[in-house]
Amino acid sequence: MLLKPINQQVVAIMGASSGIGRLAAFMFAQKGAKVMVSARSEAGLKSLVDEIHLFGGEVEYVVADVSDIEQVQAFVDKTVAQYGRLDTWVNAAATGVIGRFEDITIEEYKRVIDVTLMGQVNGVKAALPYLKQQGGAIICVSSMEGRRSLPLQNPYSTAKHGLEGFLEGLRVELMHDKIPVSVTSILPSVINTPYYNKVRTKLGVKPTGIPPYYQPKVVAEAILYAAENPTRDFIAGDVGRVLDVLQKLSPQLVDTVLAAIGFVGQRTNEPKAAGTDNLYEPIEGYDKIEGDFGKLTIPTFLDNLDRNPALKWGAVAAGVAALFGLLGQDKA
């Protein structure tokens, strides 16, 4: 399956007012793509559009809530009306409630599912008919919580597990029907975005991801790679790869580790007042790319190999050759 170079693409991004979606929109525009962005925060979208226009990028915005299929459909239709087609669909929108399951109401739980899972379903439902016309890419920002649930993040983990199931089934249907649309799940590790500023918490304090963090660029680069290179899954951040291996080898071990660090590791000492979250409505002050945990970020190394298959498999071949060389010396 061949995908167009980014500078020839029309890209639509949901969840673009802050964090990963905002940076991805900026990077797509820098590389010459025509970009349409959406989120609930009009202030965040306007400031993003202004930033992109400063360097001559081509971008427009539509305010929409991903949980409302009619608003999502209007966003997709506006993209095609504006630019004539759609080549890449990206959805980075998500919300959550952090706290013990018993403390989360059913209404709150449903809202997380409506945004974080059904928002992805709504987006693909609206975008797919256009993508099928000439081929393209569906890129959904999932999470390593789609493979390993965390304590205190039950609704979010449930939504991301559901997203992984949705994408697997969709991918096979498109493959069976020989439809040239790639389906990519981006699985970030803990990322330093404003998510933990905006998320609803039942902890009485501002929550945090379990360190270490990675900067949003790690995920944005994976998104841009998948827009040009058909990719099934892309884990962003080396800690995510370690967690994936451990979960496959011994889920019970991961249970034990998370029971020891998963509760204290998701709390800060900073108070957070009730009602200062974006679960139902956008909140002001966080229309930016990075969050508050830059000092806890670390570099990633294996992402570069995943974005350079020739280098990756060359390294594997060199490692195998070295191993056989050592074995040969032992026999000699």
Image: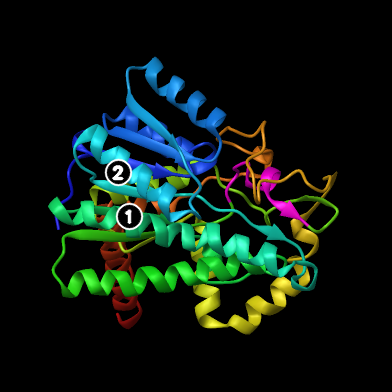
* First along the sequence among labels 1 and 2: 2
Q: Which residues are magenta?
A: 191-201
The residue labelled by disc 1 is 126
Q: Secondary structure at mark 2?
A: helix
Give the x, y percent position of residue 137. 26, 53
Q: Does 149 appear in magenta?
A: no
Q: Is residue 226 left or right of residue 47?
A: left
Q: Are marks 1 and 2 in contact (CB under 8 Å)?
A: yes
Give the x, y percent position of residue 49. 43, 25
Q: Does 194 appear in magenta?
A: yes
Q: Is residue 306 left or right of residue 284?
A: left
Residue 140 lies, with reference to residue 9, above or below; the image says below
Amino acid type, mark 2: Asp
Q: Is residue 309 left or right of residue 291?
A: left
Amino acid type, mark 1: Ala
Residue 205 lies, with reference to residue 194, above or below; the image says below
